[in-house]
Image (cartoon, coloured by chain):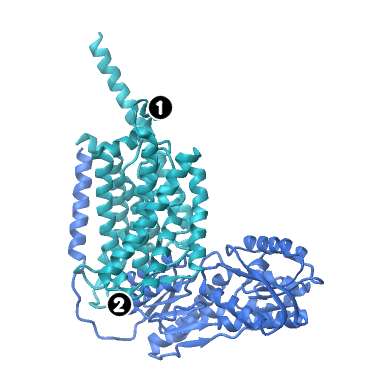
Chain colours: A cyan, B blue
Amino acid sequence: MRRLLASQETGLVIVLVLVTLALALLAGTHPDRESGLQVNNFWNSHTLIQTATDASFFAIMAIGATLVIISGGIDLSVGSIYALAGVSMALLLRAVGPLPPTSTSLIGLGVCLGVGLLAGIFNGLLIVGLRVHPFIITLGTMWMLRGVAFVASKAESIRVPASLTCVTKASLGLTEGLFPVPMLAMLVIAVLGSLYLKRTVMGRHIFAFGGNLEASRFAGLPLRRIQTGVFAVSGLLAGVAAFLGAGFYGSASSGDAQGYELYVIASAVVGGASLLGGKGSALGATLGALLIVLIRQSIRTLHLDQNYEWIVIGCAIIAAVVVDQWSTRLAARRLSGRAGTDGSAANP
Amino acid sequence: MRAFRKLAALAAIVAGAGACSIDTGAKPPIQAKTKDKITIAMIAKSSTNPVFLASRTGAEAAAKQLSDSLHITVEVVWLTPPQEDGQVQAQRIQQAVNDGADAILISCSDAGKVTGAINDAVDRGVPVMTFDSDAPESKRFAYYGVDDLKTGAQVMAELATLLGGKGKVAILAGNQNAPNLQHRAQGVREEAAKHPGIQIAGVFNHIETPQDAAAEVIRAGNAYPDLSGWAMIGGWALFTQSLLTDLNPARIKVVSVDALPAQLAYVDKGVVPVLLAQPVYQWGFVGVSIIVDKLHFKKDPPQIIPMELIRVTKENLGVWARQLRDWGFTDVPAEYLSR
């Protein structure tokens, strides 16, 4: 229980609950169009699911980016992989023409995952093969992959088949106008990501790789495979986000997800990932994305001036990381204090 | 630990209260009646583009005027993203509906991305009108703006006249993904094809900021020393003053869309002899007026409401400057107001 309370995720959950509570109290109400009853401007099913949906695309990519960050790297190309995967899917589905809904969805998902995975492997192989820092390689591929998407799509925004939108906007038995699929996908991927990082050997290898490269090398870990693997997973999850995004919004273009890489990295960092490597969690990244989107949402829900959005988000990111560092130092000091006390008790 | 328990209890209370208030089934609609407050969510392409700030001024002026004359409250809620992003616009449409907006007025950054969200809004009882950049396949009830193909053609026709029907021309085209700009560029090409002496050097896209646009003009000018004209289908590059010295009017002729205060010096100094102004203030003013007509007076407008371009030259510079001032622009140079 003490470990649970001391974890970064618990702190984020508390902040999320407090922000949610504040928004629910301060948001005001409006009359419901159908019933005429007063509805809270924030605490209603539509806004809550919409907020989670907005966060889901960042969060899914942030889980992949967290793996990369834990390994001590960085992936600036996730937004471009998202655009390329979406455009490839839309072009292919347009080329093959009308198909049954299941086939459309499966082909779409396959193309997005395939393109995302290949782009991620491409990043990983370049980093490992050329021995260049991931920042430089993914900075380059960020432009290259978006350029490929641009040339392939001829700058067109390509509509995806309606059957795909029906899948990603399925109401799953909820009221009309509620679309929980991206949110559910985010939750499933967060759980799978957590299990992968905490319960599998590969996951623990990533922490070891990012925490102490030299020790990992002496321990005989497959370093090249680990590094290529994290970029592959990051690309794969960008592909998943692209499938959900293109389906949900109904089209794909080379301009999609421009600048999202920074939101994705911010989500991972706010979620507790250390840019020095060796630290981070999938759940933290998801909560980080939710917090950033919630802050963005709060500016609009409280009818604050939209022009302050970037300032508020920037301050929130810095504040979150500083608070995290303080709490880490405090915990370390407590531990060293306790160790000192234990030591003095053992050696009077 | 005790504090955590309290927080957990609080969270549980909040969650429980929410679960009670979340509606899970459709309820019978209440009888329609004339509302005493109309909230219009306005979603332009980007809040850093001055043309959309002018449209916001127009929308707010119309809201004030209509509130006074009809004795109702017309409110404009500005939900424009800081940067162009169709996906964010779609999210803001959803948010406007969730917040109880009565109507939405939008200029679409990416028609494909917002069509689904517009249709969802209409299905949930919120009428949507587009301006500047349309989503023609959506369920929006009206579009107000220029015909982009015609605009591009008009820019090229003016330029061809200035060039005497011959020369190498470049197209400054802003965001490559914006469908309205793609149509304008197509209009320029189609018109150029009617002039055998005109050759298109290329279409130059750029990030839609004044600095990026001006830099693109200089780069292209260096790459094509034989360039004799610029067809600017948006006014971005002329929002800076740097091209006043970099473009030689004796060698290069320029015709541009838009005629905002920062661009007027280019006309005055002869660097850009013709500006084709979109009365951008009217996007907001006319948009809000049409929405109020629909919601308050139950009037259905035509689906396409064309906006005509205004030709601004040295001859009518003073008249146009005063018009801009009357529309709320505070940065119109005083020297033009007295002409």
> Percent x, y for residue B48?
55, 64
Label pair 2/1, CB-CB below 8 angstroms: no
Q: Residues within 10 Å of mark 1 (few under 14, many from 20)?
A: few
Residue A55 visible in the shown view: no
Quarter of the figure with the N terminus of chain B: top left
The answer to which quarter of the image holds residue B21 is bottom left
Q: Who is closer to the viewer here, A130 or A186?
A: A130
> Percent x, y for residue A17?
28, 51
Q: Who is closer to the viewer here, B279 or B140?
A: B140
Q: Is residue A186 left or right of residue B77?
A: left
Q: Who is closer to the viewer here, A200 or B337?
A: A200
Q: Which residue has dot 2 on it?
A: B124
Query: Farthest residue toward the right?
Result: B250
The answer to which quarter of the image holds residue A9 is top left
The amino acid type found where label 1 is placed reads: Glu
Residue lying at 44% horizontally and 90% vertically, measured from the top left: B301
Q: Chain of mark 1?
A: A
The answer to which quarter of the image holds residue B186 is bottom right
SS of the residue at dot 2? loop
Residue A309 to residue B337: above or below: above
Q: Who is closer to the viewer here, A318 or A211?
A: A211
Residue A192 to residue B101: above or below: above
> Percent x, y for residue A24?
29, 59
Residue lying at 39% horizontally and 57% vertically, measured from the top left: A115
Residue A140 to residue B41: above or below: above
Q: Is residue B116 left or right of residue A100?
A: right
Query: Farthest residue toward the front?
Result: A96
Residue B123 visible in the shown view: yes
Q: Which mark is residue A214?
A: 1
Q: Chain of mark 2?
A: B
